[in-house]
Amino acid sequence: MKKTHMIWASIALVSALMTGCGGQSAQPVAINESVDKCDICNMQIADDHNATEIILKDGKALKFDDIGDLFAWIKKNGTEKIDVKFVRDYHSKEWMNLNDATFAYDKEFKTPMAYGVYSFKDKQSAEAFVKEQGKGQILTAEQLNSHNWEMNMDQMKDMKHHGDMEHKEGDKAGDHSKQQ
C-alpha cells in the first residue's frame, strides 16, 4: 500500500512541475524551411539565427524571417494576445525568450528583411560581436520597443526576393502588409 501511495505522490509532483509553477509554458516551434512562411512578408523562413516566433495565448505559433517583421506584427496587432516572443542566439541558433536576449544593431548587418538586428544569449556575446565587427550598438529587449524599425533600402535592393510582397522605399516595420 505504501508503494502505491508513493507512486501516486510522485506522479502528482511531476504533474505539478510540468503544468508550471509560474514558469514559461509555451515553447518555440521548429522551423520547417520547406513550408514555413513569414506571417508578415510571406517569405520562406530559413532555419537560422534570424528566425523569430510569437506564441499566442491560444497556442498558435506565428513565425517570422526577421525580428523586424515580428515587431511589424506587434505594431499591427498589439501585444494582448501574445504569450511569449522567441528569438535565436546568433551563434548557436538556440531559442530563447526575447525578453532575456541582448541585441546588436547596425544598418549594415545583413538580415532577411534588412532590419539589421541580431539576437544574443547575453550582453557579453553581443558586445564581443560588435567589437569584432567594428560597428553596431547594443540594445536591450526594452529598447527594441522604441527602436526605429527601418529597413536598409540599399541592402534590400541588393537582395533577390521570391514572394508576393513588394517593399517600397521608406518601409518601416508595420508599414508593409502580409499578402494572403
Image (spheres, rainbow, N blue to C red):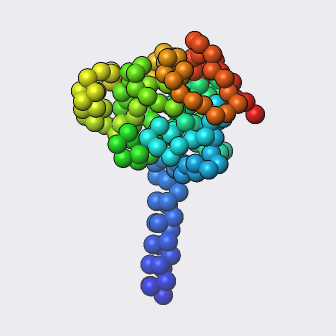
Please name whichever residue, 2 or 85, is drawn nearer the observer in this view of the structure: 85
The residue positioned farthest toward the right in the image shown: 180
| Whether residue 71 can be seen here | yes
- The number of numbered discs placed on residues in the rendered structure image is 0
Counting from the top left corner in percent of width and height, residue 18 is at 49, 60
Residue 105, located in which quarter of the rendered image? top left
The C terminus, quarter of image: top right
Please name whichever residue, 144 or 104, is drawn nearer the observer in this view of the structure: 104
Q: Which residue is found at the position 36% from the left and 32% from the top?
A: 102
Residue 78 vs residue 139: left or right? right
Counting from the top left corner in percent of width and height, residue 42 is at 66, 35
Q: Which residue is found at the position 51% from the left and 23% from the top?
A: 158
Q: Which residue is found at the position 47% from the left and 30% from the top?
A: 111
Q: Which residue is found at the position 24% from the left and 27% from the top?
A: 131
Please name whichever residue, 50 or 101, is drawn nearer the observer in this view of the structure: 50
Please name whichever residue, 130 or 142, is drawn nearer the observer in this view of the structure: 130
Residue 5 vs residue 168: left or right? left
* 137 up-or-down from 112: above or below: above
| Whether residue 56 can be seen here | no
Counting from the top left corner in percent of width and height, residue 141 is at 42, 28
Counting from the top left corner in percent of width and height, residue 148 is at 48, 15
The residue positioned farthest toward the top in the image shown: 170
